[in-house]
Each structure stands twice: as C-alpha cells, then as structure tokens.
Image (cartoon, grey):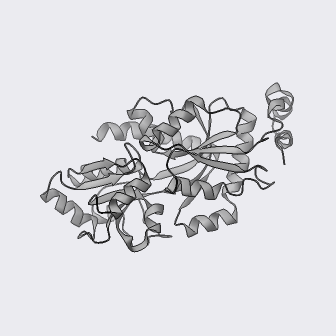
Amino acid sequence: MKMKTITTKLAGLAMGSLLALSPMAAQAEDYPNAPIQVAVAYGPGGATDFQARIVTMMAGKENYLNMPMVIFNKPGAGGQKGWNWYASSASTDGHQLAAYNVPHFIAQSLKFETSYNVDNLEPVANWGADPAVLIVPANSPFNSAGELVEWSKANPGKLTVAGAGLYVGHHIAALQLDKAADISTKYIPAGGGVAAMKMVLGSQVMAGFNNLSDAYRQGNKIKILAVADNQREESFLPDVPTFKEQGIDIDDSSVNFRGIMARKGTPPEVLDYLAERVHLMFQDGKVAKKMKAGGSPMRIMTRDEVKAMWTERQAYLQELLADLK
C-alpha cells in the first residue's frame, strides 16, 4: 500500500482536503518508493542494534510500510558520531530514519556541543524501555549492590565500572550510584554496550552498567546485582532487586527508551504516515515474540506520547545533570 492512501486517512480531519491538494502532499504521494534506511548510532550486536532489527523486520508487509527497513550502523562516542551525522547530513524525505536512545541523546546534547537536540529531531514511535543493571563477572566476590558499595567505601576510587559511553544511561546510573551511596568509583566509557560487556566478561573491570536486555542474554556468564528502575523487571529478572530495595536511592533516570525518529524538515504527511504505520508495526505479534525471547522489554508509545516524554526528560535531565558530578 503506497503513500497515496494518506489522503484517505486524513479525509476525516478538518484539514484533510487541503493537505491532499497541497504541493507537499503531492510530493509525498509515492512514499516510500525505496527501502528505508534506519541508522543505529551503536555497533552491531548491542541492544539497540539487536532490537532495531527485530522491530523493523515486518516493515515490508503491505499493512505496514510495504517497503523494507534496512539497518546500518554508525557507532562512536557513545552515539554522538551517528547522531551528529544524522542531524546534519541525513535526508529529510523519510527514506533515512534513525533509532533514538533516551536519555542518551538528550543528556549528550545538554553536556556537549552536538548537532542534535530535541528541537531538530522528530519522534516517530517508541518500541522499548530497557533499564540499566549493575553487573559483575561470574567469579566476582560481590553478590549484592550493598557488598559492592561497602568494598568501594573501604577502597575509595578503586572500583572500576564499565559503561557504553559518556552521558548515556549507563553513565547516568554510575553517577547516581556514586552520589546515592556516597562512594567514588572509576567510570570507564567503553565505546558501546558490547565493548562494555566484554570488559566485564573478561574481568578487565570489577563491575559495569549495561542494558537489562544485553545482560539477560549473557545467562550465567555474569551476575546481575541490581536494576536501576523504580520496580523489578518481573518478566525477565524477577529475582533481581532494584537499587531502592537495597537501600540505594537510584530511580528510573537511566532507563533507556528506544524508538525511531526522523530529521526536522521531514514532510508532515510523511511523519503522520510513519507515526501510524510504525506504531502498528511495533505491535505485531511476531515482533513481540522475538523481543520477549531476546529478553528485551517493550514499551510501545505513539508519536505524541514520545514528544511528551522527550519534553519531560529534557527538563528533568537538565536538573539531574546539574546535580551530578
């Protein structure tokens, strides 16, 4: 089904007929007319890449986009390399989209000079929310977050903690741990979640923060000590307590929301079409089944819901990051 059906979809709206007759609508009539590229600002095999390939696998079906989505990776600097490219160089015709990670891109835009921010990117739909978890090697002497904190207090500055990058969810969780537990850890940005996980698996660091979905897939190769969220992840890690349950006041600030976005300047009717079809695609039963099998929590949100979430997280992170050193 091509974009020409967009006029039918808008017919019930007050401005539907005007949109159908506008030059912009005419330009978008044949959208999409080629495979849609989706940039992932992280490397192959990590949680974002893994999940993006699952949630887009049904795109070629006629009742979704009738055109495949093709993932390509632009990793580097905790997502900055890919998102800087996307916000400054990607096309605005709807054929080049990108996966977003929140709080990552918002926090980075607040702390660094980036080409991207909430004002020049357009959310399409959200597919998941992946909490950060505190992990240690399988042979680690630590069996709880409390034991790790006590060791760190007795050995200030010596606890090494890996994470994907600077001002990604992992880093925010590490900063919160230092503040909430009154400890001083050494955070090591590894250049991506896969690299950060390898550092823990290889005992190159004593601990790490990583995505729940990545940690879940490691099985007994690691120990998961705590979940950085306001509640347990009952579907995947029912026996792993939150930090709060262990007396450490860490909330859901580092939960990694993932979805698809477009560049500012993408035609409104293309955005509307994508917002409708991608949101439906994320709800496909085959997608849900594969996501669950991969230990990947889903949280499907509409374009309007994501807009509200971005606005709320922007204001919240401005305050949070000013208070975290």
Residue in front for this viewpoint, 255 or 43: 43
Q: Residue 41: give x, y in percent of width and height.
A: 52, 44
Q: In the rendered image, which quarter is residue 137 located in?
A: bottom left
Q: Residue 268: give x, y in percent of width and height.
A: 72, 33
| Number of numbered discs | 0
Residue in front for this viewpoint, 70 or 257: 70
Which residue is drawn at the image coordinates 82% and 40% (left, top)? 10
Quarter placement of the C terminus: top left
Which residue is drawn at the image coordinates 86% and 40% (left, top)? 4
Q: In the rendered image, which quarter is residue 127 located in?
A: bottom right
Q: Is residue 1 left or right of residue 81?
A: right
Which residue is drawn at the image coordinates 56% and 42% (left, top)? 308
Q: Is residue 52 left or right of residue 212?
A: right
Which residue is drawn at the image coordinates 36% and 56% (left, top)? 209
Residue in front for this viewpoint, 23 or 158: 158
Q: Residue 75: give x, y in percent of width and height.
A: 49, 44
Residue 147 seen in render: yes
Question: Image height check: is 277 above or below 294?
Answer: above
Question: Image height check: is 217 above or below 164?
Answer: below
Residue at the outermost top position: 23
Q: Residue 84: give x, y in percent of width and height.
A: 51, 33
Residue 118 seen in render: no
Question: Image height check: is 171 above or below 239?
Answer: above
Residue at the outermost left position: 154
